[in-house]
Amino acid sequence: MLKGFKRLVWQLAVIVSVLSAFVFAGTPAFAGNTADVTVYATPQFLSITVSPTSYNFTVVVESSNTTTANTSYFTIDNSCSVTANMSIGVTTANWSGGVQWINSTTATPGVDTAGLYACKGPGTWGTDEVIVKAVAGANKISTNQASNTDFYYGLDLMAPSTFGDGVEKSIIVRVTAYVGA
Amino acid sequence: MRKFGVVLLCLLTMVVMGCGTVEPVTPATEPVPSINWITTNPNLDIGWNFQYNKQLDAVVNGCKWKVVSGSLPTGIQLMEDGLLTGVATVMEETGNFSVEARKGQSYGIMAFNYKVIDKIWVYPSEVKVGNFYPGARAEYTIKVHNDYSIMSEQKQVTTESVDIPDAQGFISVPIPIRQELHDGSIANVLSLVSSCAGDVLKITGYDKGKNTIQIDGFAPMSTRIISVSYISDSLFTLQYEKPSEKEIDVSSMVVIMEPKFVLGPHETKEILVALDMPKDAKIDVKQFQFRVVASKGVKTGGGMSMEAAMAITWTVTMR
């Protein structure tokens, strides 16, 4: 009787082992440290373009204040399928070309230091404008912009109080569409 | 008594006269639609082959909307609350339709025109990572799509170098078809020259490697201005970006498998982005964000360049 019981236990152990092998063989081989991280995405599209793609303030004088023709000079063609925020910033800290201009983070002109403002159209200079500074920490030019709804903006350059040279300066202004705060 | 009878007769006469007065009856007709009731721009520019959502607007909220004539773009439908939604599936489809927005007895009708065109897009808009911890790695494949944009350039050419058989010449014209990024990288991006106007000119070929087009039909003149239209490949970049100065810097942990790439017209690329956090990383917040920014190259130099970028927001929640 005891012998038969031992045989039964042994047979059960073999069956459990074989079944376990099958079960674990069917489990994906996760890297040990990534198995329980959850990653998922929001199925929405982001899509914007800008026109025109360049602007030249031409010759400016020291301490001058020059704006685009109006606050709706540039068009953002917004085809985002979701409500998005839009920030505006410059991609570099300085304007390139000869003696570089610092792009002031407070839009305060100084020696070879320029300030730049942006205003969403049809807003008013001085009341609706935001400072255009580096993209990390860039200001919002449009909050909760409805999906597939275009908007417009203009730029205002505060020229340096003193120029180090007369070489043409350039910089890239970037409008970024994003979801979230 | 007789006086009373006269008064009564007068009153009766007045009543009868009053009843006999026929007031003009307004026929029960449909109210006339209100002008400017619908406020949405009637020219719709719809992206091809990706999700389209646009809320139509009227002067009051809560209208019920319906199409009353024409047809919507293939793949797009109008919901009763005024949301145009769907995926437009026919490239370059154009057409028009009219919608009615009604609230009670008040309503308006507006005619819309539409055009379906290929546009730049990135997908998705957000990636969320949960239950994350030092030593873990999270991956997601994002998609970047290039549009089909035709560009035009004004170009001054001279005939000095022209070979002129039979008083007709051909010339190789360099055209500015390279894109330069703010980091100084440059890519040759010419894909296809579509037309060339300015005289009786004919494009006989183009050389992507040399950035030139060959034009036939020049008469011997000193200089002239031509306009060249071309379809361009595009140089894209993907970069890590902190959403604000307060966010923690995980730049060394963000792995973008291909941070620069060229896309032809209509082309879509999938790129793996990973967040790889070392075991000894010290993260003292429960949640943080960063962005992966996709941008198309712009030409630089000569004043300010405008750039449009799309940022995928990654929200990471720690275990």
Image (tube, coloured by chain):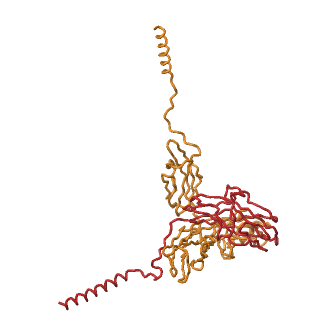
Whether residue B199 is visible here, answered yes or no, is no
Residue positioned 60% across, 67% down in the render: B310
For chain A, what colour was chosen? Answer: red
In the picture as drawn, the residue positioned furthest to the bottom comes out as: A3
Whether residue B277 is visible here, answered yes or no, is yes
Residue positioned 72% across, 58% down in the render: A126
In front: A137, or B305? A137
Residue positioned 37% across, 82% down in the render: A24
In front: B94, or A98? A98
Whether residue A123 sits left or right of residue A9 in the image: it is: right
Whether residue B312 sits left or right of residue B298 in the image: it is: left
Residue B233 is situated, as x and y percent measured from the top left of the image, at 62, 71
For chain B, what colour was chosen? Answer: orange
In front: B84, or B150? B84
Residue B259 is situated, as x and y percent measured from the top left of the image, at 60, 76
Residue B184 is situated, as x and y percent measured from the top left of the image, at 69, 76
